[in-house]
Image (spheres, rainbow, N blue to C red):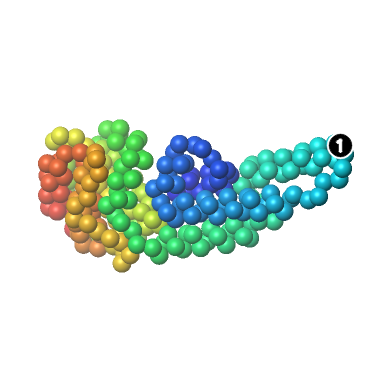
Amino acid sequence: MDELKFRREAYENPNSHDVDFLQAMRESKERAAFVNDLKRLDDQLESALKVDVPEGLEAKLLLNQQLHQHQVQRRKTGVTLALVASIAFIAGISFSLLRLGPVDLGQHALAHVYHEKVAMQMEDDISFDTINTQLASMGTLPNARFIEQPGRVLFSTYCDFQGVKSIHLVMQGEKGKVTLFIVPVEERMILEEAFADNRYQGVGFSADNAYMLLVAENHTDLDNIKDEIKQSFI
């Protein structure tokens, strides 16, 4: 689940039990804190609406109906007008913290591979000229480019690394597919030369003003694609 979809789901229903939503929240302390803030706002809203109920069944039913209608409407519109300013303020702070906090590129790359499952199923043949056009359009890597085809490229698109526009490629290795992320350099980023989990292995290295992150299931593929990138990317 990407950041935009996660935030939309959080605004609409911070108590959602959707599996993808819960998984995305567990992967980031900042996301969990953001959802907890929205839950507290919901609690405050519900408390504010709890007024003394006049005696009599008719009055109680009327109040309960109004409260239910208000909560349903809130989930349809995202937020109520009364809380727009507060939520915008919290969202702004959360986004700023995400932008300023350190970014573990290795862990972020692994999470990206798991969530972009469609990318691993693509079988296109993308030229290095197309990738160069994408690199040039980013603006942050004006001189970065491939001077030759770096092997077979099956998939290419833009992606977001904690607010940094980057390139996401999937390449064909000898044993399997290899994911490559090209991320513009920022001081807050933490680059590890090697990272892994129970399924994937990854390597990171610098090239020009970009960080390169390779992720694959087979280490031989990582070494081979790394050599190809170093020979073709300037």
Q: Quadrant of residue 85?
A: bottom right
Q: Regarding mark 1 in the picture, which secondary structure is present there?
A: helix
State the residue in front, 67 or 189: 67
**Residue shown at 59%/53% (left/top)?**
40
Q: Position of residue 91 (x, y in %)?
A: 53, 58
Q: Position of residue 102 (x, y in %)?
A: 35, 62
Q: Is residue 63 visible?
A: yes
State the residue in front, 64 or 159: 64
Residue type, label 1: Glu
Q: Quadrant of residue 210?
A: bottom left
Position of 139 relative to 79 (above/below): below
Q: Name the image quarter holding the C terminus.
A: bottom left
State the residue in front, 17 or 232: 17
Q: Is residue 137 visible?
A: no
Position of 204 relative to 62 (above/below): below
Is 138 on the left or on the right of 80, as rendered?
left
In the picture of the structure, the residue carrying the numbered disc 1 is 58
Q: Position of residue 172 (x, y in %)?
A: 19, 37
Q: Residue furthest bottom?
A: 187
Q: Position of residue 107 (x, y in %)?
A: 30, 50
**Residue shown at 72%/53% (left/top)?**
48
